[in-house]
C-alpha cells in the first residue's frame, strides 16, 4: 500500500495546476542529449511530449520560458554550437525568452525568478532534461521560492548512473526515483501532458 507523501500530509495540492494559470518552463532541451555520450534514454519521446505541451501553451497564450545550460565554447553545452542548440521540436519563437544558466538550478544566478515575478507567474509546469539533475534542481528551487510546481514525467528523461555500490542503475530507475522524491513534497508529478488540465 502506498504511504502518504509529505505533500499530502501538509495539505498541499496533489493535482496538476491547469495550463490556463501556469507558465511553461522548458529546461535544457538541447541537442547534446540526443546523441553521443550524453544521449538520454527515451529522449525522443520526451521531446515529442514537450512539443505537445509547448503547442498547447502557445495556443492558450500562456507564458513560455526556455532554459539552456551554457558551459562555453567546445563544451557539451556550447549554445553557439550544435550540441547546445535547442532541439527543433521545441525551438523558441520570437518573443519567447531564452535564459542561460551555468548551474543545475535554473534560478541560481539567472533572471528567471525576476522574469516570472514581472509577468505575474506563480504556477509553473516544468519539462526537459535531465530528470534527476536540472529538472529536479529547478523544481526544488521553485518550491523553496514559493512557486507551485508541476513536473510532467513523460516530458522528461535521464540516463543510467552508477549506484553507491558501483553497479549501474538503469535510467528508468533514476528517472522514477527522482520523480518520486519530487512528488513527496516539492512538486505535483503529472504522468503525461494530457493529464494537465486546460
Image (cartoon, helix red, strand yellow):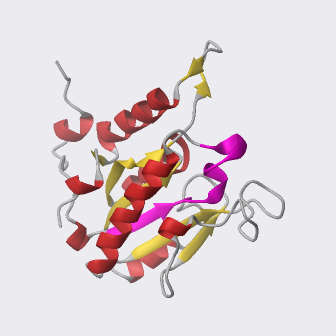
Q: Is residue 69 left or right of residue 137?
A: right
Residue located farthest toward the top when viewing the structure as drawn: 165
Residue 170 locus on image (x, y percent): 52, 25
Q: Nearer the viewer, residue 7 or 2?
A: 2
Q: Is residue 6 magenta?
A: no
Residue 148 locus on image (x, y percent): 29, 59
Q: Residue at x 75, y 71 (%)?
A: 80
Q: Work out whether 16 lies above or below 73.
A: above
Report which quarter residue 8 is drawn in: top left
Residue 163 locus on image (x, y percent): 59, 20
Report which quarter residue 122 is drawn in: bottom left
Residues in magenta?
A: 23-39
Residue located farthest toward the bottom when viewing the structure as drawn: 95
Q: Residue at x 34, y 64 (%)?
A: 53
Q: Quadrant of the C terminus?
A: bottom left
Residue 121 visible somewhere in the drawing: no
Q: Is residue 32 magenta?
A: yes
Q: Residue at x 31, y 40 (%)?
A: 183
Q: Quadrant of the N terminus?
A: top left
Amino acid at each position: 500500500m502506498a504511504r502518504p507523501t509529505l505533500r499530502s500530509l501538509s495539505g498541499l495540492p496533489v493535482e496538476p495546476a491547469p495550463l490556463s494559470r501556469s507558465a511553461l518552463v522548458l529546461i535544457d532541451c538541447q541537442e547534446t542529449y540526443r546523441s553521443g555520450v550524453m544521449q538520454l534514454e527515451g529522449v525522443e519521446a520526451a521531446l515529442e511530449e514537450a512539443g505537445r505541451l509547448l503547442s498547447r501553451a502557445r495556443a492558450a497564450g500562456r507564458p513560455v520560458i526556455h532554459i539552456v545550460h551554457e558551459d562555453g565554447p567546445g563544451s557539451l553545452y556550447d549554445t553557439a554550437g550544435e550540441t547546445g542548440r535547442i532541439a527543433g521540436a521545441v525551438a523558441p519563437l520570437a518573443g519567447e525568452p531564452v535564459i542561460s544558466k551555468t548551474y543545475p538550478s535554473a534560478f541560481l544566478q539567472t533572471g528567471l525568478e525576476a522574469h516570472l515575478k514581472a509577468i505575474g507567474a506563480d504556477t509553473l509546469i516544468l519539462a526537459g532534461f535531465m530528470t534527476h539533475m536540472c529538472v529536479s534542481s529547478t523544481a526544488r528551487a521553485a518550491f523553496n521560492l514559493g512557486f507551485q510546481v508541476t513536473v510532467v514525467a513523460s516530458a522528461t528523461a535521464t540516463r543510467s548512473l552508477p549506484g553507491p555500490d558501483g553497479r549501474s542503475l538503469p535510467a528508468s530507475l533514476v528517472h522514477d526515483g527522482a520523480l518520486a522524491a519530487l512528488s513527496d513534497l516539492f512538486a505535483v508529478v503529472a504522468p503525461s501532458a494530457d493529464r494537465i488540465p486546460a
